[in-house]
Amino acid sequence: METTGGNILSRLGEKTVGWLILGLLVFLGIAIYRMPAETKSYIWNCIWRSAGWVAIAVAVPWSSKLFIRRVMDVGANWAGLVLVASLTAVDIIAGVLLMTGWPSGFWPWAATIVALGVAATYNYLVTEYLADMAD
């Protein structure tokens, strides 16, 4: 989008980045077109399974809204810890059920551990938010 006024270098940079992204998308399209059918199928399976896991990991902690009041009535930190740990365990179980095999190599394991860390942090933040709203 062109703006009035402004630096010519910024407009030139925007156009350059836009053309670079377009070139990369064309290159990616050609690369996908030339892949064997098995590889394309594997990539789509990974995308759909990952998207399914993300949807489950996002939705599961909101279910604690149904019983957050009871957890708060206990009034102990261990109850909150058990809640967050159980939500993370559900994320792990969903991930294991959606995987077709165990990750092989360092980077797939690192990505799995980072994803579980992000999911656990999200679980904690959602339960904290729900606890604040329940007060």
Image (cartoon, rainbow, N blue to C red):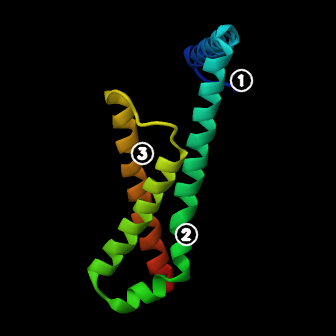
Earlier sequence position, callout 1 versus callout 2: 1
- Position of residue 55 measured from the top left corner of the image (x, y, whole percent): 60, 53
Answer with left or right where residue 38 lies relative to residue 73: right
Secondary-structure class at tag 3: helix
Amino acid type indicated by mark 3: Ala
Amino acid type indicated by mark 2: Trp
Pair 3/1: label in front: 3
| Residue corresponding to mark 3 | 115
Question: Which is more toward the observer, 21 or 15?
Answer: 21
- Position of residue 18 measured from the top left corner of the image (x, y, whole percent): 64, 17
In the figure, 22 relative to 53: above or below?
above
- In which quarter of the view is residue 107 placed? top left
Q: Is residue 2 visible?
A: yes
On residue 62, the disc is 2
Secondary-structure class at tag 2: helix
| Residue corresponding to mark 1 | 2
In the figure, 120 relative to 8: above or below?
below
- Position of residue 29 measured from the top left corner of the image (x, y, whole percent): 69, 14
Earlier sequence position, callout 3 versus callout 2: 2
Question: Which is more toward the observer, 118 or 48?
Answer: 48
Q: Residue at left 37%, top 29%?
A: 104
Q: Residue at left 66%, top 14%?
A: 32
Pair 1/2: label in front: 2
Crowding at mark 1 (Cα within 10 Å: few <14, some 14-19, many 20+)? few
Q: Residue at left 40%, top 68%?
A: 86
Can you name the residue that lies furthest to the front here? 101
Cα separation, mark 1 vs mark 2, equals 42 Å
Earlier sequence position, callout 3 versus callout 1: 1
Crowding at mark 3 (Cα within 10 Å: few <14, some 14-19, many 20+)? some
Amino acid type indicated by mark 1: Glu
